Image (tube, coloured by chain):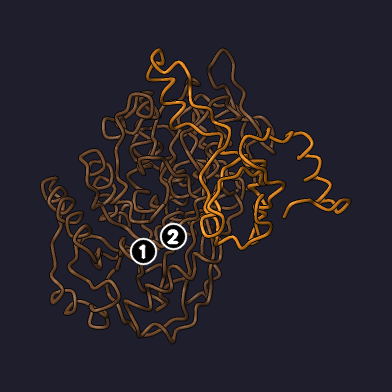
Chain colours: A brown, B orange
Amino acid sequence: MKPYSLWSLVRNGISYDKDWQQAWRSPEPKKHYDVVIIGGGGHGLATAYYLARECGVRNVAVIEKGWLGGGNTGRNTTIVRSNYLLDESAGIYEHAMKLWEGLSQELNYNVMFSQRGLLHLAHSVHDMQEIGRRGNAIHLNGIDSEFLNPQQIKKMLPIINLNCRYPVMGGLLQRRGGTARHDAVAWGYARGADDMGVDIIQNCAVEGFDIQNGEVKGVRTSKGLIGAGKVGCVVAGHSSVLAEMAGFRMPLESVPLQALVSEPVKPVIDCVVMSNGIHVYVSQSDKGELVVGAGSDAYISYSQRGSFDQIEHVVGPLVELFPLFSRLRMLRQWGGIVDVTTDRSPILSKTPVKNLFINCGWGTGGFKCTPGSGHLFAHSIAQGEMHEKAAPFSIDRFNTGALIDEGAAAAVAH
Amino acid sequence: MLLIECPWCGQRDQTEFSAHGEAHIARPTETATLNDEQWGNYVFFRSNSKGLHYERWTHDFGCRRWFNAVRDTVSDQFLVTYKPGEPAPDAKQLTQQLSDATSGTAKVSGV
């Protein structure tokens, strides 16, 4: 693989961009791989990348039903943060944040990671208590968090309407939070993994598992049986469907989550703004569009469409907070299917089937942890035992009762 | 979705209703003898079906009564709604109804 550089830009510019290498191959599947990763989204590709890069496991395939990053990786609001309440969460999300901070260099691919700051607003006494408790917990875990009063918020965001229907009483700021270019994360990991010999097989749907004596031996796909020493299942909304194929159930519900994007405008907000209390989150992309996250529906669905009233529920508070935006037209709106756990924390776990590992349950906030999730999952698969930072996120917690309740920090109401 | 057939009020707008997860999950009777695994399975583990899903709804901004529904989670189409206590409709028959509906040979009852 030829690295991307300023020099390669100039050289390819001179040759009218005709000589760029393809970023990854499209191979036919081999008969057998040491590890098969199901799901070619950010988390699956990151898992394959770190398996090859750090664990020395290079006979790896990533199989994807559609196209790379075409699921929730391409549908999220690109927000990155690590401001969670509990120690286990701080461990995994901050692990991801540290990987984000060197990711473009590591991958030789510009993921446009921008630590522009992330501001959680509080609109009530209860909100203030929640950010107070969480902000201090984050601080004690060695992660940056600052409290802002309304005047400081106004200085940071001159266009905000502090005296909206539920007046802004304060905010919790993580300056290292921000956004990244979601597609580039999938493409960067895919390119890096492919370069180390990982086969990325798109348009290849999983139809079942080959399980013998309680141990997974392969994956039945639309391109035939693919033998596997170990299998990692990283399929977000469809995790329960794959678990059913393998003969067990998951503590998950898959629901639609929507987002929308406005027409592009000149820079108006230079940080990510989130509000749990009135439920809106918004940032401005580098192209100038406002990226707005809506709430999730309460009913199970695999339709990749949400209900219309959710759009009204997010646009109302958005316009109340930023009256300036009332004149903007929304250009696109879409839905993704997110797999939500009861405690709003992910599942990285072994399963009842030997050598079948599962990474799911990221719910409404998986993008931020893409590097950390892939990194810890790769090490866990390679070792055959869950990494110590991933171990608390086992499926077993739903039977032992050791839940990791991040209902408040998860931000999206569901 | 958009219109939902309340078994008491008839067709009403979706925004009048709220969804409350999987239906027909009976609370275990021998609670004193259940172990952690059985409790966890009852409280947290769900079918999360892709396809037919039996689920509970309430008509919050209407009669405020609970009812059950069978919905196709791929198309969000309601196949049938029924009152609590009534037996769950046969899945095989509903699957047939759904495939007839998608192939255009029959009209789906309900909404």
Q: Which residue is mark 1?
A: A279
> Residue B27 versus residue A177: which sits nearer the camera?
B27
* Circle 1: residue type: His
User: Which residue is located at x 53 percent, y 49 percent?
Assistant: B19
Left or right: A198 as drawn, with respect to A174: right
User: Which residue is located at x 48 percent, y 71 percent?
Assistant: A312
> Residue A25 versus residue A259: which sits nearer the camera?
A259
User: Which residue is located at x 39 percent, y 49 percent?
Assistant: A366
Element type where label 2 sits in the image: strand
Callout 1–callout 2 Cβ contact below 8 Å: yes
Q: Tag 1, which chain?
A: A
Q: Which mark is residue A295?
A: 2
The answer to whether A105 is drawn above or below residue B81 in the figure is below
Residue B93 is situated, as x and y percent measured from the top left of the image, at 79, 36
What's the distance in space between the residues labelled 1 and 2, CA to CA?
Answer: 7 Å
Left or right: A256 as drawn, with respect to A94: right
Element type where label 1 sits in the image: loop
The answer to whether A286 is drawn above or below residue A212 in the figure is below
Which quadrant of the figure has residue A307? bottom right
Residue A244 is situated, as x and y percent measured from the top left of the image, at 58, 30
User: Which residue is located at x 89 percent, y 51 percent?
Assistant: B105
| Disc nearer the start of the sequence (1/2) | 1
Left or right: A79 as drawn, with respect to A60: left
Residue extending farthest right: B105
